[in-house]
Image (cartoon, rainbow, N blue to C red):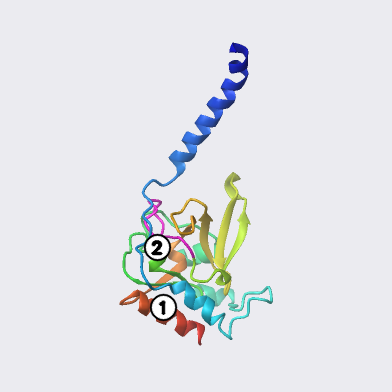
């Protein structure tokens, strides 16, 4: 019996330690988004992609020269969106923003996230449980800094947004950790008004 415990004991201790580290790394104050009868995501799937955006070619529909990007974006926005940088946590405008509204890509104004899907992850960056339309948010495997992460970017202009992690609240269990510098925010009076803004873009 003692011999059996000696061979299994280190494995059990290792598993317990790994579990403790994982629990420590997880944000413990995830607050699910407030429930609403308006599902902004439904209008994206119902409308389909707008006629001026074709994501089947493999190239970003919105192309700009380096000079045009520099003119459109601030230094920080350019660093984050075009150079895949990261802004400081807790020191960005949308982390604690609780207004109702629409979050658009800073590079091309594509609607990416709704305030109805935003939650406080405690990480210091704006966090969402899902994008408005998965087709307009691309993913790439990110192996930087000795980690394996999933980078997300605007599929319309290629601007880096942040990363997605599998530790979010219901209903998706995902946490889209997004840089404020990659977004612009358009306030709206209600979730219905957010949906109307999204529908307007899809019908341009």
Q: Kindly give the residue lying farthest to the front in the view shown.
A: 1
Q: Main secondary structure of the magenta part?
A: loop
Q: For residue 36, which quarter of the picture?
A: bottom left
Write the start and end of the magenta stretch as one range.
Answer: 119-130
Q: Residue furthest right?
A: 57
Percent of width and height locating residue 100: 33, 71
Badge 2: few (under 14), some or many (20 or more) residues near its Cα, within 10 Å?
Answer: many
Left-right relation of 149 to 189:
right
Q: Which residue is mark 2?
A: 118
Q: Secondary structure at mark 1?
A: helix
Q: Check residue 195 in the rendering and tell me which mark sits there, or answer none.
A: 1
Residue in view at x 41 percent, y 65 percent: 117
Q: Say if 46 sits above or below 6 in the image.
A: below
First along the sequence among labels 1 and 2: 2
Picture coordinates of residue 79 (x, y %)? 51, 63
Q: Say which of 11 and 159 sits in front.
A: 11
- Give the CA distance from mark 1 to mark 2: 15 Å
Q: Identify the residue at the far top of this view.
A: 2
Q: Is residue 105 visible?
A: no
Q: Quadrant of residue 96?
A: bottom left
On whether residue 151 falls in the magenta region, the answer is no
Local SS, label 2 = strand
> How many labels sit on residues?
2
Query: Which label sits on residue 136?
Result: none
């Amino acid at each position: 019996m003692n011999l059996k415990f000696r061979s299994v004991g280190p494995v059990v201790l290792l598993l317990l330690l790994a579990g403790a580290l994982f629990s420590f790394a997880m944000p413990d104050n995830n607050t699910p988004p407030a429930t609403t009868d308006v599902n902004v995501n439904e209008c994206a799937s119902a409308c389909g992609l707008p006629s001026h955006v074709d994501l089947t070619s493999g190239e970003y529909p919105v192309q700009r020269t380096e000079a045009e990007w520099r003119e459109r974006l601030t230094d920080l926005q350019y660093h984050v969106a075009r150079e895949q940088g990261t802004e400081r946590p807790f020191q960005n405008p949308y982390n604690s923003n609780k207004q109702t509204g629409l979050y658009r890509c800073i590079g091309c104004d594509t609607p990416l996230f709704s305030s109805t899907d935003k939650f406080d992850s405690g990480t210091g960056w704006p966090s969402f449980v899902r994008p408005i339309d998965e087709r307009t948010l691309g993913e790439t495997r990110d192996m930087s800094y000795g980690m394996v992460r999933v980078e997300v970017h605007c599929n319309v202009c290629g601007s880096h947004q942040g990363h997605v992690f599998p530790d979010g609240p219901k209903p998706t269990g995902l946490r889209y950790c997004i840089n404020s510098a990659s977004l612009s925010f358009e306030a709206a009076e209600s979730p219905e008004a957010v949906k109307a803004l999204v529908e307007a873009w899809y019908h341009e």
